[in-house]
Structure formats: C-alpha cells, structure tokens
Image: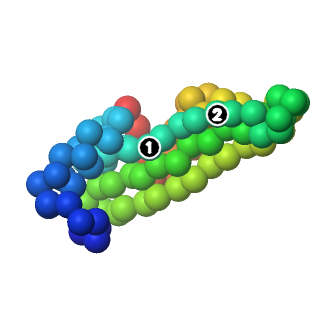
Amino acid sequence: MGRLPVSAGAAKTVEGLMVQETRGDADLSGLTASCASIADNSRNLGWWIGRIRSPKRDVTFAISMEGQNALPGMEIRSRVTPVLVQAGLLPPS
C-alpha cells in the first residue's frame, strides 16, 4: 500500500468505498463479474476477486469458473462466502 501517486487521504477514501460488507472486525472488499469466454457465447466466465482485512489478518483471493454452465460472479460470491466463514477467514454474519 502507499505506492500509487495519490494522497494518503484519497487512498483511504477509495479503500473505504470498496468495502462491501463488515462482519465483526473484518471488512470484505471485492469485485464480481461475468462474461462470455468465447465469441459465440458457448462458454461463460465468472469471477470474484476480493480481500478480507481484519486486525488479525489481511487475505486476498481470486476465484473463477469457466465453462458452458459457469456461474456468474455474484453467484460465485454467494456460494463461496460460507466457505470463507467455515475456513475461519471471515466471521459469521
């Protein structure tokens, strides 16, 4: 952190805007998206890239699916969030 040519205040503001959810002392930030992975739309690609930041840890992750029946990014997020909780990386809601 701190390597972009912006003020510390601007960086802190943007970082705060990216937080999607707070659970206990952990902030969950991320981005989901989906698109066709082949021009004829026969395969899909979905992903969720994120960060879990708490006083105890700072974890970044990336999850993607590609295939004919690949899930969209928001569905990946909804299915993987309980796994992050079960792994102890994210507090329960």
- In this rendering, position of residue 34 left or right of residue 6: right
Nearer-the-camera pick, 4 or 22: 4
Q: Nearer the viewer, mark 2 or mark 1?
A: 2
Nearer-the-camera pick, 54 or 39: 39
Q: For the point 44% across and 43% down, which residue is it?
A: 30
Q: How far apart are marks 2 and 1 (CA)?
A: 14 Å
What amino acid type should be assigned to the residue bearing mark 1?
A: Gly
x%, y% of residue 70?
77, 34
> Can residue 82 be seen in the rendering of this structure?
no
Which residue is disc 2 drawn over?
34
- In this rendering, position of residue 36 left or right of residue 54: right
Which residue is disc 1 drawn over?
30
Give neighbour class at mark 1: few <14, some 14-19, many 20+ (Cα, 10 Å). Answer: some
Q: For the point 26% across and 39% down, which residue is it?
A: 17
Q: Residue 85 carries which label?
A: none
By what rule are the colours in the image chosen? rainbow
In which quadrant will I find the C terminus? top left
Q: For the point 36% across and 62% down, which residue is it?
A: 58
x%, y% of residue 89?
45, 53
What amino acid type should be assigned to the residue bearing mark 2?
A: Ser
> Can residue 37 be seen in the rendering of this structure?
yes
x%, y% of residue 29?
38, 44
Q: Is mark 2 on a helix, strand or loop?
A: strand
> Does residue 36 lie above or below 13 as drawn?
above
Q: For the point 73% across and 43% down, which residue is it?
A: 65
Give neighbour class at mark 2: few <14, some 14-19, many 20+ (Cα, 10 Å). Answer: some
Q: Is mark 1 on a helix, strand or loop?
A: strand
Q: Residue furthest bottom?
A: 3
> Does residue 4 lie above or below 46 as drawn?
below
Report if the CB atoms under discs 2 and 1 are less than 8 Å apart.
no
